[in-house]
Each structure stands twice: as structure tokens, then as C-alpha cells.
Image (cartoon, rainbow, N blue to C red):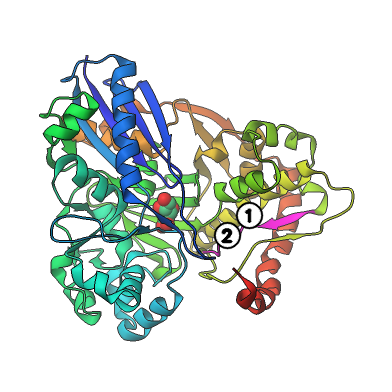
């Protein structure tokens, strides 16, 4: 029997999938690690924890499945995007990784805009946002110059992990697209952007396709996890590109709603299609020469985990959400905006914070939980509105992640998006996309599409209920006003944040 392994290096945990030739998940392991949040707006992780948890997880995966050491045809990766990992000449990590949801870099974003002007959108196709990598690199250059001096290379999270498993240094196009340092259309590092900010081009790793072969496991890593040192490793992709791949979003017109720590609405875009001029993200897909457009809600699943940890510690999400189906659309007049760590789409605003509007003495905790789910979904609708306003049809959306685990929430998505929501029978999120990249890299299939038609099975459909659609349209009009009305209040509160 032959398998591939998909490693999904997420924000809260690494998830490992052992997948057979039919796309069936034979074994699955999840290993968590913490966020380090020293100040409001800071979000870091220790890369050593990614490596330790992945190696331990791989060992458990291999042991529990009871497979032979040469049974794995390929390993590939999906990674949380944008996080800055700086390494010195010996490949040693110089500081904690600064993650995608860290918002300390507003000043650096303004600097990038003023130095590059229109050239930024012309080359990198995306605006300067706090989460992206170049602003983080500039922050380190300005605030920790002695570390920047020692840095030989910058990597993204999964690229560092892959380096520790193979000793090979690469970055794939789909992840490099989120650095603001790559020319998105020519798929090369931009010397113009590097030069403008004094970033030596030599700090940028070699670029590679997502299914590209990077090397084999280092002997120590192979021995530790119980696999042969000849096990082949393929580059992998950004988590959103892998989420799209694993959900079969591989041709024009396909759309995805993915709710993990962040939430995204993503649509496939062929080479040469419209790039939306920075209003949504425009990144290279893991599928060669294709792109995707994406709007991001920073705190989607994170809103719910924040609420659970703060007000319902020890309860499972199933317990927390068990009664939301008893509450009518609109949560009894309670609205939530999911800006607990700032926002990206449609408001690139690191200062904005979340609100509950309309709290009433009659509201129970269940109203709050439903309002949070509705608020996350309204925020994702903001991205859908951007696509629709320029004529893109979004009628059918594949839903994956936390938002696809709850039937009531799936119906809320159908009603708020006014679109048919489809689930997948064997949904595994970005980890399956990573496994598919390994399967294509290993030569099991000629293309990702061929692999998708073999690996991915459709699940259930949820159709919009017109009375709910009308109610949610009215609520959405109120929801949209909360940002503008609370912006000056939140700006005034910035000095009081810890
Ligand atoms: C995308 C983004 C997030 C992370 C989550 O631009 O910042 O979706 O990729 O891991």
C-alpha cells in the first residue's frame, strides 16, 4: 500500500494526514502550539515548536497507521501565510516568527505606499497590509537592526519547517505571493521592490512550483519519524491555496468559503483575468499558472475561540453552539462585528475593534454565539459584495473549515450569502490540498484537477430560504454601518490598549 502525507502548519496546530491512493484519510494527527501575544496587536510563534510538534506528530502518524518505512510516496505542506521567519547563514532562527495576524506594522505599510506609489499594485498586485511579510521585514530592520544584519534569508512558516525536514531552502509561488516582494505575473522576486527598501535579493529564497520536488528527508528526521530517508518531499503551498485545492476550486467560477482562525472568500481566476486593483487579495494559486482572488476576515473562527476561552472555558464548540438553532435569524437584535484583532477586507484597519450592538437583558449566551456566527458571515459577505459589484457571479460556494461543521451555520451562510452552499463528503481542509500536491509531485496524477476528481467527493447542499435572505439583507444594512460609526470611538481607545 502506498500513501502521501499532507502537513498543514496552521496557526493553532499542525494537522497531519496520511492519505491513500483513493484519497481516503487512513490516519490523522493534530498537535497544537500556542500563540505568543506580548502586546495588543502582537502575534508570534516559536518556530522550534512547529518543528517539534510536526516531528512528534509524524512519528505518531506512522506508528498508529502501522505502515512500512518506505510506504510514503511523498510529503507536502500547507502553511499559514505571510509569517516572517528570519534565519542566519547557518540556518539558525534569529527571533520568534511574526505571524499573519500581527498588526504592529502600520507605519511600515504607510512607508511602503509612499515609497512605491502605484508600482506596488503594478508589481505585487496587492496593497501594503500589516499582515503581509515585507512590512514585518521592515519592522525588524528598523526596530531590531542588529538582528536584520545577521539575517541571511527570510522564510515563511512552512518553508522553515520543510527546511528542517530536508535541509533544502525554497519558497513556492503561492506563498511568495503574500510577501509583497514577488512580481505576481512574472513569478520572480522583484529587484525593484527589494532595492527600494534595502532588502538584498539574496535574502529571498529560491522559488518553486507547489508540486515541485525539493529533496528527501534528512537522515535524522527520517529516523525520528520512522520513515525512509529516501522519502520524497514536495514544496507545498499557502494554506488558502491548499484549502482551495483540497476543495476542488480549480476552474473559473469556483468559489470557496473557508473558516479557520481567519475566514476567507476565495474565487479561482485564470491567468490574465481581472486582478481587482488591490480591493481583494490577488495571489498565485498552487495550481500552476492560475490565480485566486480572496477577501479575508482576520478573526473568523478566532472570534469564537476568543469568546469560548473568555466566557466558556473548558466547553467544546459543540456544547457552545448546541442551541443556536432555536434562535431566529438576527439573534434577537444582537449584531457582532468580528474585529477583535483589527480587519483586512473590506476595511484594511489595524485599529478597529469588535462590537456587540443591541445587547438586551433578554439575551442569553446562545444569542451571543449565534450573533458571532452571523457577524463572521456578514463580514465574509462584504468580500462577496466586492466580487458581485464588479460582475462576478457567486451563486455556488463550497464551504470548508469550522463553518462547515455546523448545519445551522451552513444555512446561515446560504441565507446571508444568498447562494447555494455545498459541503464536501470528505472535507479535510488545506491538509488534503497538501496531500494532493504530494500525489501530483509523486506522479500519481498528471494534474491537480485529475487528482481532485479522484480524491474529492461532494457532500450536502444548503439552499437560501427567501424569508431569511430578506431578514439578513435588512440586518446587513445595519451591520455595514457599525464600522463607520465605531471607527472614531476605536481610534480614541487606542492609547488605552495594553
Ligand atoms: C491570508 C491570511 C490568512 C492566513 C491564515 O492572507 O493572512 O488567511 O493565511 O493562515
Q: Is residue 409 above or below residue 91?
A: above
Residue position marked by numbered label 2 in the rendering: 382
Give the extent of the magenta segment: 334-343
Residue plotted at (54% across, 39% down) = 402
Residue plotted at (36% across, 68% down) = 126
Residue 378 percent location from the top left of the image? 63, 54
**Magenta residues, dominant SS class:** loop
Residue 25 percent location from the top left of the image? 36, 22
Residue 282 percent location from the top left of the image? 36, 61
Quarter of the image where one finds residue 22: top left
Q: Is residue 154 visible?
A: yes
Q: Are marks 2 and 1 in contact (CB under 8 Å)?
A: yes
Q: Is residue 271 visible?
A: no
Disc 2: CA contacts within 10 A as few (<14), some (14-19) or many (>=20) = many
Residue 410 percent location from the top left of the image? 61, 37
- Residue positioned most to the right: 361
User: How far is the residue under mark 2 from the one under mark 1?
Assistant: 6 Å
- Point out the image quarter for the C terminus: bottom right
Quarter of the image where one finds residue 337: bottom right
Q: Is residue 469 left or right of residue 108?
A: right
Q: Is residue 436 left or right of residue 73?
A: right
Disc 1: CA contacts within 10 A as few (<14), some (14-19) or many (>=20) = many
Q: Quadrant of ligand 1?
A: bottom left
Q: How many discs mark residues in the rendered view?
A: 2
Find out whether residue 489 is within the magenta segment: no
Find out whether residue 340 is within the magenta segment: yes
Q: Is residue 380 above or below residue 107?
A: above
Q: Between residues 436 and 83, which one lies in front from this camera angle?
A: 83
Q: Between residues 475 and 260, which one lies in front from this camera angle?
A: 260
- Point out the image quarter for the N terminus: top left
Residue plotted at (35% across, 73% down) = 139
Residue position marked by numbered label 1 in the rendering: 378
Amino acid at each position: 500500500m502506498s500513501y502521501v502525507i499532507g502537513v498543514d502548519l496552521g496557526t493553532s496546530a499542525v494537522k497531519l494526514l496520511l492519505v491513500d491512493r483513493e484519497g481516503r484519510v487512513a490516519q490523522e494527527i493534530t498537535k497544537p502550539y500556542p500563540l505568543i501575544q506580548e502586546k495588543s496587536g502582537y502575534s508570534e510563534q516559536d518556530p522550534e515548536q512547529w518543528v517539534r510538534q510536526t516531528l512528534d506528530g509524524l512519528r505518531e502518524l506512522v506508528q498508529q497507521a502501522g505502515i512500512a518505512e518506505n510506504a510514503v510516496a511523498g510529503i507536502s505542506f500547507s502553511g499559514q501565510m505571510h509569517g516572517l521567519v528570519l534565519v542566519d547563514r547557518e540556518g539558525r532562527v534569529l527571533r520568534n516568527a511574526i505571524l499573519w495576524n500581527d498588526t504592529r506594522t502600520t507605519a511600515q505599510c504607510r512607508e511602503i505606499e509612499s515609497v512605491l506609489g502605484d508600482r506596488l499594485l503594478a508589481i505585487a498586485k496587492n496593497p501594503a497590509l500589516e499582515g503581509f511579510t515585507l512590512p514585518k521585514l521592515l519592522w525588524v530592520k528598523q526596530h531590531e537592526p542588529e538582528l536584520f544584519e545577521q539575517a541571511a534569508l527570510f522564510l515563511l512558516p512552512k518553508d522553515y519547517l520543510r527546511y528542517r525536514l530536508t535541509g533544502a531552502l525554497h519558497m513556492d509561488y503561492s506563498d511568495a505571493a503574500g510577501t509583497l516582494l514577488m512580481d505576481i505575473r512574472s513569478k520572480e522576486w522583484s529587484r525593484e521592490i527589494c532595492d527600494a527598501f534595502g532588502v538584498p535579493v539574496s535574502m529571498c529564497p529560491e522559488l518553486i512550483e507547489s508540486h515541485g520536488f525539493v529533496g528527501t528527508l534528512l537522515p535524522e528526521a527520517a529516523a525520528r519519524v520512522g520513515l525512509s530517508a529516501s522519502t520524497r518531499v514536495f514544496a507545498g503551498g499557502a494554506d488558502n491555496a491548499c484549502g482551495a485545492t483540497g476543495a476542488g476550486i480549480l476552474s473559473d467560477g469556483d468559489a470557496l468559503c473557508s473558516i479557520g482562525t481567519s475566514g476567507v472568500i476565495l474565487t479561482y481566476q485564470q491567468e490574465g483575468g481581472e486582478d481587482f486593483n488591490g480591493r481583494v487579495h490577488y495571489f498565485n494559486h498552487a495550481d500552476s499558472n492560475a490565480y485566486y482572488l480572496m477577501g479575508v476576515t482576520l478573526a473568523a473562527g478566532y472570534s469564537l475561540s476568543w469568546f469560548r476561552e473568555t466566557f466558556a472555558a473548558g466547553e467544546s464548540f459543540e456544547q457552545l453552539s448546541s442551541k443556536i438553532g432555536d434562535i431566529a435569524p438576527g439573534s434577537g437584535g444582537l449584531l457582532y462585528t468580528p474585529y477583535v484583532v483589527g480587519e483586512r477586507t473590506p476595511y484594511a484597519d489595524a485599529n478597529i475593534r469588535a462590537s456587540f450592538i443591541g445587547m438586551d437583558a433578554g439575551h442569553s449566551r446562545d444569542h451571543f454565539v449565534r450573533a458571532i456566527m452571523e457577524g463572521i458571515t456578514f463580514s465574509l459577505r462584504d468580500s462577496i459584495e466586492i466580487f458581485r459589484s464588479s460582475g462576478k457571479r457567486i451563486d455556488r460556494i463550497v464551504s470548508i473549515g469550522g463553518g462547515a461543521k455546523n448545519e445551522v451555520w451552513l444555512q446561515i451562510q446560504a441565507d446571508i450569502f444568498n447562494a447555494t452552499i455545498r459541503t464536501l463528503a470528505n472535507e479535510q481542509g488545506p491538509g488534503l490540498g497538501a496531500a494532493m500536491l504530494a500525489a501530483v509531485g509523486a506522479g500519481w496524477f498528471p494534474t491537480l484537477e485529475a487528482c481532485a476528481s479522484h480524491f474529492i467527493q461532494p457532500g450536502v447542499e444548503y439552499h437560501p430560504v427567501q424569508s431569511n435572505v430578506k431578514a439578513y439583507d435588512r440586518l446587513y444594512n445595519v451591520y455595514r454601518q457599525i464600522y463607520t460609526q465605531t471607527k472614531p470611538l476605536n481610534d480614541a481607545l487606542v492609547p488605552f490598549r495594553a
